[in-house]
Image (cartoon, helix red, strand yellow):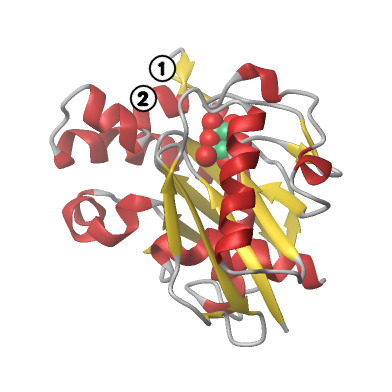
């Protein structure tokens, strides 16, 4: 079954039809810059533009970079605060809406680095913020929000996200130290058998993963930029 998957990010909103059996994009993906300020009406316009571009009349799945419960937005750390309380599912024309890291995690567990892995698996995405997706024997525990754990008295994502690396002009080695400290903390809390590192940095993993040593197996995500689109589409069929 083909589903239109749309991934709302801090810099771009990306969409493509996805074959949910194979996880393949069936048409070239469309990316439109995220409007600023990224208020609900402006973002909904871009989502509608993507739906129109593909002349899509079938099911649509959308990711959102905050807590989403039953289609309603409950947090907005990196997007405009006017999102809180908005029924995003309704706003996007009855689409399925879920957290961005949860969507990426679902895709990685089915088609990527977590395929076939049982036990506790943690996907962590490093981008504007830090997103998390926790799986127990392949089942998602949604909205875990581990990016907001406290690290050195600060919100972890303010210290260890990819944005923090850029904002503070950190070398890959220096940033890796922060990420390692964060991973050790998460490892202590959950004792996962696998940690998958996703987000834009996953394609540059050779720059920082060699600097990181934790007891748990740590691997880069396989689907990289497309994980959110694929996961959004997958959730919509289940
Ligand atoms: C949000 C999460 C989101 C993550 C990555 C965090 O600031 O609270 O919901 O998954 O950023 O976008």
Residue 133 appears in the rendering: no
Q: Is residue 86 left or right of residue 154?
A: right
- Camera-nearest residue between 84 and 125: 84
Q: Where residue 125 is drawn, which disc sits there?
A: none
The kind of secondary structure element at disc 1 is loop
Direction from residue 59 to residue 186 in the image, left or right: left
Q: Tell whether 221 sits left or right of 140.
A: left
Find the distance from the CA under tag 1 to the CA under tag 2: 9 Å
Q: Which residue appears at 59% of the width and 32% of the height?
A: 42
Residue at the far top in the pictured view: 153
Residue 159 disc label: 2
Q: Position of residue 222 (x, y in %)?
A: 41, 71
Image spot of residue 234 (x, y percent): 69, 70
- Name the residue that disc number 1 marks: 152
Tell which residue pokes out farthest to the right in this image: 70
Residue 119 place in picture, x, y as percent: 67, 67
| Location of residue 31 (image quadrant) | bottom left
Instruction: Tell me if the residue at label 1 has its CB under 8 Å from ligand 1.
Output: no
Q: Earlier in the sequence, mark 1 or mark 2?
A: 1
Question: In the picture, residue 4 is in which quadrant?
Answer: bottom right
Question: Is 73 drawn above or below residue 22 in the view shown?
Answer: above
Residue at position x 66%, y 86% in the image? 21
> Is residue 196 among the parts visible in the rendering?
yes
Q: Does the closest atom of ligand 1 sit within 8 Å of the Cβ of label 2? A: no
* Mark 1 and mark 2 residues within 8 Å of each other at the beta carbon: yes
Quadrant of the rendered image holding ligand 1: top right
Which mark's residue is nearer the viewer, 1 or 2?
2
Q: Position of residue 90 (x, y in %)?
A: 83, 43
Under tag 2, what secondary structure?
helix
User: Could you tell me which residue is drawn at 46 percent across and 60 percent down?
Assistant: 196
Q: Is residue 229 left or right of residue 41?
A: left
Q: Nearer the viewer, residue 190 or 26?
A: 26
């Amino acid at each position: 079954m083909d589903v239109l998957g749309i991934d709302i990010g801090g810099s771009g909103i990306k969409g493509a039809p996805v074959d949910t059996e194979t996880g393949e994009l069936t048409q070239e993906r469309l990316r439109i810059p995220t409007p600023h300020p990224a208020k609900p009406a402006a973002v909904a316009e871009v989502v509608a533009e993507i739906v129109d571009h593909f002349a899509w009349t079938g099911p649509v799945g959308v990711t959102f970079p905050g807590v989403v419960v039953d289609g309603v937005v409950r947090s907005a750390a990196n997007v405009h605060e006017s999102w809180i309380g908005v029924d995003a599912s309704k706003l996007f024309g009855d689409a399925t809406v879920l957290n961005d890291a949860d969507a990426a995690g679902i895709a990685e567990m089915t088609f990527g680095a977590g395929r076939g892995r049982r036990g506790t698996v943690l996907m962590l995405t490093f981008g504007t913020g830090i997103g998390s997706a926790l799986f127990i024997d392949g089942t998602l525990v949604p909205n875990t929000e581990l990016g907001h754990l406290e690290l050195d008295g600060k919100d972890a994502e303010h210290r260890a996200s990819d944005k923090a690396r850029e904002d503070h002009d950190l070398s890959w080695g220096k940033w890796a130290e922060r990420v390692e400290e964060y991973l050790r903390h998460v490892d202590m809390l959950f004792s996962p058998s696998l940690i998958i590192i996703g987000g834009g940095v996953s394609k540059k993993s050779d720059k920082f993963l060699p600097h990181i040593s934790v007891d748990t197996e740590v691997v880069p995500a396989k689907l990289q930029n497309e994980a959110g689109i694929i996961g959004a589409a997958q959730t919509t069929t289940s």
